[in-house]
Amino acid sequence: MVNSLKDKVALITGASRGIGKATALRLAEEGVHIAVNYLQNEDAAKKTVAELQAKGVKAAVFQTNVGDLDAHDALLAAVVKTFGTIDILIHNAALGAFKPVHRLKMNQWDLSMNINAKAFLSLAQKVLPLMEPKKEGTIIAISSLGSHRFIPNYGAIGISKAALESLIRYLGVELMPKGIRVNGVSGGLVDTDALKAFPFFDTFKTEVLKRTPAGRIGKPEDLARVVTFLCSPESSWIVGQVLIADGGLSLI
Ligand SMILES: NC(=O)c1ccc[n+]([C@@H]2O[C@H](COP(=O)([O-])OP(=O)(O)OC[C@H]3O[C@@H](n4cnc5c(N)ncnc54)[C@H](OP(=O)(O)O)[C@@H]3O)[C@@H](O)[C@H]2O)c1
């Protein structure tokens, strides 16, 4: 567990846009230096870094496809070379094909499993040598309601998020005695670029809105605040859990 956020170093996968970016900006307000990982959108990643630096923290871009597990050693080495260590790992990047599961190709299964779930395990294993000697570290992954509920065309991602949430529980138990706290944050529909990939998005959004007690869809900041809470000592008794922030959607 990280005792105070000021001057800690966080690696956030997929921090160029959306929830990852909002999390980076929110953590920067607590004085956390940020390694901004991204896949292909260099301009967005550099813009995020400029916004983080304007908040007075150190920030730098790290282009890596986190679904390529062989690239993780180089990613972590580059982050450590720039920042000296990693105190907080946030696995936020996700991708996947939007289609019914019964039409899913095996390479599409592999793609979302690798990026969304397996990358989390690999990155968590590889940050351990940095966190264990300090007996301090925080590991967080971002999930979604599709991990345990049917969402049309969302199976590839939803199933990988189910694996991710199970990993959070196992790693939560195994790593807490080493001083490393693992948790997850799950959200309902959040207004980011990712929504453009949903087939029939307008109909889907109308349905979601009708069923959301809070009467709106989420903003990236709604999840970023929960991630920041889970990074802070205020949440020290929360271990291996996935906190849901969804305006009440999952209760209906
Ligand atoms: N939006 C929602 O409704 C919602 C709800 C609940 C949970 N979530 C979860 O929240 C997380 C972020 O979603 P979002 O909506 O913010 O997504 P987004 O706006 O589409 O942003 C995705 C981010 O991930 C990066 N990325 C994608 N694949 C990558 C890869 N293989 N390697 C490295 N970086 C990669 C992208 O980089 P580039 O900019 O380079 O493409 C971008 O920074 C995901 O885990 C998602 O499942 C989203």
Image (cartoon, rainbow, N blue to C red):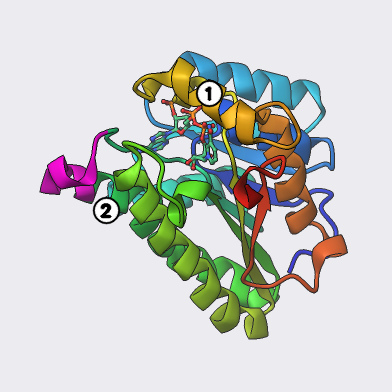
Which one is nearer the viewer's eye here, 191 or 92? 191
Which one is nearer the viewer's eye here, 104 or 183? 104
Q: Along the horizontal axis of the image, is 240 left or right of 2? A: left
Q: Along the horizontal axis of the image, is 38 left or right of 16? A: left
Dot 1 amino acid type: Lys
Dot 2 amino acid type: Asp
| Quarter the N terminus occupies | bottom right
Give me the residue at 83% from left, 35% from top.
Answer: 29
Q: Along the horizontal axis of the image, is 17 left or right of 152? A: right
Mark closer to the observer (2, 1): 1
> Distance from label 2 to label 1 (Cα)?
37 Å
According to the picture, the residue beneath numbered tag 2 turns out to be: 70
Q: Secondary structure at mark 2?
A: helix
Give me the residue at 65% from left, 33% from top.
Answer: 59
According to the picture, the residue beneath numbered tag 1 turns out to be: 205
Q: Residues within 10 Å of mark 1 (few under 14, many from 20)?
A: some
Q: Along the horizontal axis of the image, is 187 left or right of 69? A: right
User: Residue 182: within the magenta?
Assistant: no
- Can residue 45 be seen here? no
Give me the residue at 39% from left, 63% from top.
Answer: 163
Identify whether 44 is placed above or below 85. Answer: above
Q: Which residues are magenta?
A: 99-109
Identify whether 43 is placed above or below 139. Answer: above
Give me the residue at 45% from left, 52% from top.
Answer: 149
